Image (tube, rainbow, N blue to C red):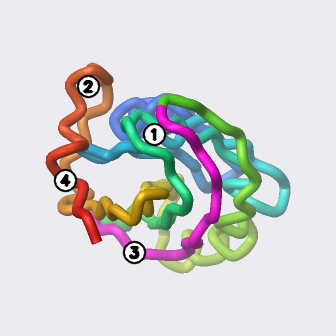
Amino acid sequence: MRRVLIALIATFLGTAVADTEHVVFTTRTTWGSPVVVSDPVTSKEFGFESVTLHNYSTQDIQALNLKVVLVTADSLEQEVDGARIHVSLAAGTSKKIDVYLAQVKALERKAHAMRLDPAVTVMTVESVDFADGALWEELDQTKAPIDFPVDDFPINDQIRKK
């Protein structure tokens, strides 16, 4: 039953899932994000040891901010980790990178203290810095279509020039 619940939660949140004994690690692509994070690789130490970044914008990326949240029993999100990643990612390309986020043991202790079993940990893109100085920031991380057609991403409407 527990595996069925994990599979249902993972399907709702995104397509890439990894799990440890009590914590599920997944990614979520938010509405209009120019970057999709997928294929999380989990290690014994990190929930997100590496991920694959896909640049669906028409601009080159030089950096992005990743955020990792723990979904609580009240369906609220509590930020537990994050990082600014400097990466050269040309428009329309993908790259696998090491991120070393979400320490598994710490999250298992936190989930146990909060009585979350299984606990769901989600990585999202918080902002993107483009090579030309433009900036994309997430407006609302709670409304994320899972299978939205890539050609219809409304990303260019949200990119601000500096």
> Which of the marked residues, 2 or 3, is nearer the chain's N terminus?
3
Q: Nearer the viewer, residue 104 or 6?
A: 104
- Name the chief secondary structure element in magenta: strand
Instruction: Give the residue number, with chain letter if any, for mark 3.
Output: 78
Disc number at residue 36?
Answer: 1
Residue 53: percent from left, percent from top: 57, 41
Residue 154: percent from left, percent from top: 18, 37
Residue 31: percent from left, percent from top: 23, 44
Asked whether 50 falls inside the magenta stretch, the response is: no
Residue type pointed to by label 4: Gln
How far apart marks 1 and 4 lie (CA) works out to: 15 Å
Q: Tell me the element at label 2.
A: loop
How far apart marks 3 and 1 lie (CA) works out to: 21 Å
Instruction: Give the residue number, with chain letter if any, for mark 2.
Output: 148
Residue 27: percent from left, percent from top: 48, 45
Q: Residue at x 42, y 36 (%)?
A: 14
How far apart marks 1 and 2 lie (CA) works out to: 11 Å
Instruction: Give the residue number, with chain letter if any, for mark 4.
Output: 158
Residue type pointed to by label 2: Phe
Q: Nearer the viewer, residue 50 or 2?
A: 50
Quadrant where the C terminus sits is: bottom left
How far apart marks 3 and 4 lie (CA) works out to: 25 Å
Q: Residue furthest left?
A: 157
Q: Nearer the viewer, mark 4 or mark 2?
A: 4
Left or right, residue 110 beside residue 55: right
